[in-house]
Image: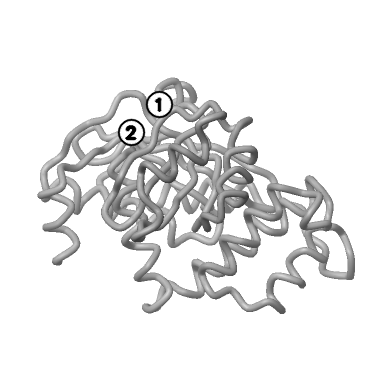
């Protein structure tokens, strides 16, 4: 997994506590709205919506917000919304690649906010294709470790499915699959009585760059600035960190 994925896990937990909670909720709501628009409002019949709602509930998103988001996304009510996805590519400190996924109803506003965040944080906008070639869409399922949820238990639950990798990362496991296999693997885990934190299709780089703590702080500051925009839904990067660097950052 990329350094951003590792750091995002820790940051995601802190976001529920600190002032970024409202930003987190806004992005979770957008995920639910888009999933409902693309696959319909039936949670049980729409796996993408199911996972979006699950992620919202795990982050303490109120049920009323979830219900309203499903209605808006499926076109019910006067405040129905329409978003489109726009991808931007860029470079951060020390040539670290960043792939920026916007979910917006205003292209010009999204482009302006991305450029501003990059320029203020030692980043530059890149030409289309200069960064994205190294990223591939992967299904990432996050499961918390416990006495009963071990790597062996996960392997036994998904042995009949095409799983690319199971990686222990701090207090959790991350299962990597092809995006088309993610729902089947998630269902296999649930059938085995194993709960999951999130299941998302994310972009993962094949060309990771190891960075020291100082560079990591700069890259994370850039990513935080990008993610602080309401137009930016996800930021993916190719920077990677050793456990020692990650531990140093977590103690900041």
In this view of the protein, which residue sits in the foreground, 199 or 120? Answer: 199
Residue 97: which numbered mark, if any?
Answer: 2
**Element type where label 1 sits in the image:** loop
On screen, residue 15 above or below 146: below
Could you tell me which residue is drawn at 18 percent across and 52 percent down?
246
Q: Which residue is mark 1?
A: 131
Could you tell me which residue is drawn at 33 percent across and 40 percent down?
167
Q: Is residue 178 left or right of residue 207?
A: right
Q: Where is residue 231 shown, x and y percent of the image?
A: 56, 55
Could you tell me which residue is drawn at 50 percent across and 68 percent down?
23
Separation (CA) of disc 2 from disc 1:
6 Å
In this view of the protein, which residue sits in the foreground, 52 or 209? Answer: 52
On screen, residue 136 above or below 144: above
On screen, residue 14 above or below 98: below
Asked if the residue at tag 1 contacts the one at tag 2, i.e. Cβ–Cβ closer than 8 Å, the answer is: yes
Q: Is residue 31 left or right of residue 169?
A: right
Q: Where is residue 90 shown, x and y percent of the image?
A: 38, 35
Q: Where is residue 65 shown, x and y percent of the image?
A: 68, 75
In this view of the protein, which residue sits in the foreground, 198 or 80? Answer: 198
């Amino acid at each position: 997994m990329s350094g951003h994925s590792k750091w995002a896990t820790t940051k995601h937990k802190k976001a529920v506590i600190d002032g970024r909670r409202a930003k987190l909720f806004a992005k979770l709501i957008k995920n639910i709205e888009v999933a409902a628009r693309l696959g319909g409002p039936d949670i049980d019949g729409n796996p993408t919506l199911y996972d979006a709602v699950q992620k919202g509930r795990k982050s303490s998103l109120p049920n009323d917000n979830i219900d309203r988001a499903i209605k808006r996304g499926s076109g019910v009510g006067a405040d129905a919304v329409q978003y489109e996805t726009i991808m931007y590519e860029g470079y951060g400190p020390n040539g670290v690649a960043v792939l920026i996924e916007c979910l917006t109803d205003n292209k010009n506003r999204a482009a302006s906010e991305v450029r501003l965040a990059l320029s203020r944080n030692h980043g530059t906008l890149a030409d289309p294709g200069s960064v994205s070639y190294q990223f591939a869409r992967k299904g990432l399922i996050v499961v918390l470790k416990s006495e009963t949820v071990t790597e062996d238990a996960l392997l036994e639950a998904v042995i009949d499915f095409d799983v690319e990798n199971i990686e222990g990362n701090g207090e959790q496991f991350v299962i990597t699959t092809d995006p088309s296999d993610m729902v089947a693997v998630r269902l296999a885990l649930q059938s085995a009585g194993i709960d999951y934190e999130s299941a998302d299709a994310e972009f993962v780089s094949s060309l990771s760059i190891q960075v020291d703590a100082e560079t990591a702080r700069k890259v994370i500051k850039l990513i935080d600035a990008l993610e602080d925009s309401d137009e930016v839904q996800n930021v993916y990067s190719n920077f990677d960190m050793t456990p020692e660097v990650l531990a140093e950052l977590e103690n900041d």
